Amino acid sequence: MIPHQNKNLKGKNLTKEAYNDIRKMIFSNELKPGQKIPYRRMADGLSMSLTPVVQALKHMEFMGLVHHEQNKGFFIEKVTPQEIDEAYKLRTIIEPIMLVQAILNFDEHGEKKIGTALDEYLAACEKGSLRLKLVKDIQFHMSIAELSGQSLSILILKYLFDFLYLRFGQELIFSRPLEDSADAHTAIFDAIKSKDVETATRLLKTHIRQIHQNALDGIQERLVEAEDIIF
């Protein structure tokens, strides 16, 4: 019985490894919307069989990140403005709810956790690395969500971040500069420390709405540019 359990655990770990590898390739723009995924070559590169790679891709298909075409393979899914709009509206609903519970749970551990995430985000802003800034932005918002202890909502938020940043592309997320993002994060943290639920909620909603609009503007500009290209 134990060897069977170890085999299952190893299979899950390999699938997770394959998933994370594909995720990184999408995040770093090595794989772009509409592009075919070279999963056989990826399996060779990861020194594993095709099974965990295909399982990872099927999970991504379920999440709407990739799609499968009969006899052709897996492809990175293209995004639509409507999907982006819906994803951000969901963030506007669930994040403030988790924020309220996070404030109720706020203690020295929570202050250190969110404070560290904020410091790392501010440092990323100073370095000017778009990718690093994006990673630290996610970590800041997730640090607040995790303090809420609402496991299902945390899982949903993780999925939304994957959906937004893997399908949308980081170059579109911040295609228009948001110099006030650092100030917004700092103000949200200060309101949390003060346990000012009303102010923290208002600031968070405003912050998400600004990013939401920025994202919609970015993808609309990109769609217009694509229409203007003459081959």
Image (tube, rainbow, N blue to C red):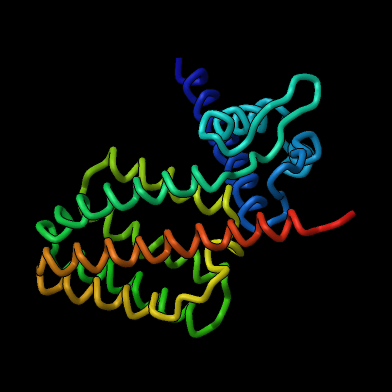
Instruction: Classify 223 as above or below 6.
Output: below
From the viewer's perspective, is 218 left or right of 115?
right
| Res 112 → quadrant | bottom left
Instruction: Classify 220 as above or below 60.
Output: below
Give residue 119's position: percent from left, percent from top.
36, 78
Give residue 203's position: percent from left, percent from top.
24, 68
Quarter of the rendering occupied by the C terminus: bottom right
Q: Residue at x 78, y 39 (%)?
A: 38
From the viewer's perspective, is 23 left or right of 50?
left
Quarter of the rendering occupied by the N terminus: top left
Q: Residue at x 20, y 50 (%)?
A: 97
From the viewer's perspective, is 131 left or right of 224?
left
Q: Looking at this view, is 229 or 208 the one in front? A: 229
Q: Residue at x 75, y 19 (%)?
A: 70
Instruction: Classify 56 as above or below 188.
Output: above
From the viewer's perspective, is 107 left or right of 222?
left
Which residue appears farthest toward the top when viewing the image? 1
Which residue appears farthest toward the right when viewing the image? 231
| Res 229 → quadrant | bottom right
Give residue 118's position: percent from left, percent from top.
34, 74
Q: Residue at x 25, y 77 (%)?
A: 187
| Res 30 → quadrant | bottom right
Give residue 120's position: percent from left, percent from top.
41, 75
Instruction: Classify 59 as above or below 155.
Output: above
Q: How many marks?
A: 0
